[in-house]
Image (cartoon, helix red, strand yellow):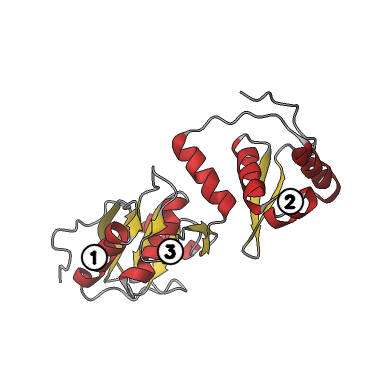
Amino acid sequence: MDLTGHIPYSNMHLSDIKVLIERGENDSIEFKQTVPSPDKIAREICALANTRGGIIFVGVSDHGELVGIRDYFEEEFWIRQGAEDLCMPAVEVRFEVIEVKKRDILLVHVSESERKPVFLKHKKKRVAFIRQHEENVVASPERLRLMAMETRDTEITFEYGAKEQRLFQYLREYGEISAEGFAKIAGISATVASRTLAALVKTGTLSVFFREKQEYFCFTVSDNKEPQTVSET
């Protein structure tokens, strides 16, 4: 039975779809057996849009089992509500259907936002999510600043002062640090630490990575030497 209505069948090769499903969930692929509610799907959409975009497979269990969808109308309605009404700014989504093993699977293509960060409207406190492997995690203040800088294409040039030198000294010795740790060793506020780390990531001086849902910062350069002084403009 054709459930698609105005939603087109996908032009993707069936073999490619099967490969994506077999690989499992990751930072750009999400499985949903059903769409539970606009609020919950909005979190998935927000995280994908703040990362690099991706595909939500509706009708596939968390373990990659193909269960299919009975009727796409409710799923499409809730997904559009989550993307357009609950995400700020709204996120562009595109729908396709593909038949896999006689089951219809709804593909929801989520575009990477050009206006990061994307927040959730229904939260009392502004919250944005990003993808970390197959999970959605709350974006840190440093990540929010970095996304905003990238969206505005902000040029960052400044002079490395005492707090940066203290940071580099610590990184040479220990290799990594959290934002909270930087604020503590440098004797600065969390806001200043966040702003400084985001700027250093934007310039390519530092890289950021996750461990147990906590962000850490380390030197980007392979020889672990801090960069030369940059003059403030």
Q: Amino acid at mark 3?
A: Glu
Are dots 2 and 1 in contact, CB under 8 Å? no
- For label 2, the SS is helix
Say whether residue 228 is left or right of residue 65. Answer: right
**Snapshot quadrant of residue 225:** top right
- For label 3, the SS is strand
Residue 172 versus residue 106 in the image, above or below = above
Q: Amino acid at mark 1?
A: Glu
The N terminus - image quarter: bottom left
In 3D space, how far apart are the residues under numbered discs 3 and 2 (Cα atoms)?
34 Å
Viewer-nearest residue: 109 or 198? 198
Viewer-nearest residue: 43 or 121? 121
Residue visible at 45% across and 48% down in the picture: 52
Q: Which mark is residue 182?
A: 2
**Snapshot quadrant of residue 181:** bottom right
Q: Which mark is residue 30?
A: 3
Number of numbered discs on residues: 3
Q: Which residue is mark 1?
A: 76
Residue 181 visible from this viewpoint: yes
Residue 223 versus residue 22 in the image, above or below = above
